Image (spheres, rainbow, N blue to C red):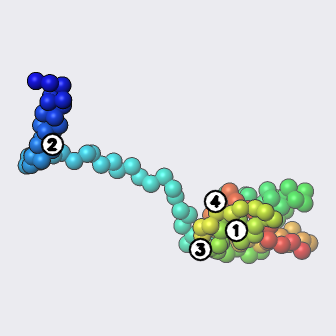
Amino acid sequence: MTQSSRIWSLLLCFSLWGCTQPSLSPVASPPTSTVPETTEKPVISNNTPPSEVIEAVGQAVSSLSGIDPNQLQIQQSSPKTWPDGCLGLPKPDELCTQALVQGWQITVTNGQKTWVYRTDGQGRVIRLESQS
């Protein structure tokens, strides 16, 4: 048998083998993993921000003004849905994630000055909206 005859014979065998019916015996499906989701979305159910959000706002005011966070009072807080990762307040030439962000709008005062901040639900992203 010549070399080319052997190659053609092998190709014919593989072709016929590929045309056979699949086995009808059940095949075990791969195990499925039941790993819980790692991303948690904050559940905002009332007008009281989480303590980490309050602390973040207090630290932001303190860094900006030098005022002790213990001298601040929350004047108003409300849950908000911001249009992007910059909480609707992008800096010039800043790229923001294009996803809705659950968060807070918090107004704090020391009796003389007032600051309005926007945060995400955990106080990790915080932006000064206005001060007066």
The amino acid pointed to by label 2 is: Ser
Q: Quick one: label 1, few (<14), some, or many (20+) residues within 10 Å? A: many
Which residue: 71% across, 71% down?
Answer: 88
Q: Nearer the viewer, mark 4 or mark 1?
A: 1
- Pick the quarter of the image with the N terminus: top left
**Mark 3 vs mark 1, CA separation in Å:** 20 Å
Label 1 sits on a secondary structure element that is loop
> Which comes sooner in the sequence, label 3 or label 4?
3
**Mark 4 vs mark 2, CA separation in Å:** 61 Å
The amino acid pointed to by label 1 is: Leu
Which residue: 86% across, 68% down?
Answer: 110
**Mark 2 vs mark 3, CA separation in Å:** 68 Å
Residue contact between numbered discs 3 and 4, judged by CB atoms under 8 Å: no
The amino acid pointed to by label 3 is: Asn
Q: Name the residue under label 4.
A: 122
Label 4 sits on a secondary structure element that is loop
Residue contact between numbered discs 3 and 1, judged by CB atoms under 8 Å: no
> Which comes sooner in the sequence, label 4 or label 2?
2
- Pick the quarter of the image with the C terminus: bottom right
Label 2 sits on a secondary structure element that is helix
Which quadrant of the structure image shows residue 112? bottom right
Which quadrant of the structure image shows residue 130? bottom right
Q: Name the residue under label 2.
A: 15
Please tell me which residue lies in front, 37 or 73. Answer: 37
The amino acid pointed to by label 4 is: Gln
Vertical placement of residue 27 versus 89, above or below = above
Label of residue 21 in the image:
none
Which quadrant of the structure image shows residue 37? bottom left
Q: Which of marks 2 and 1 is in front?
A: 2
Q: Mark 3 points at which residue?
A: 46
Q: Mark 1 points at which residue?
A: 87
> Which comes sooner in the sequence, label 4 or label 1?
1
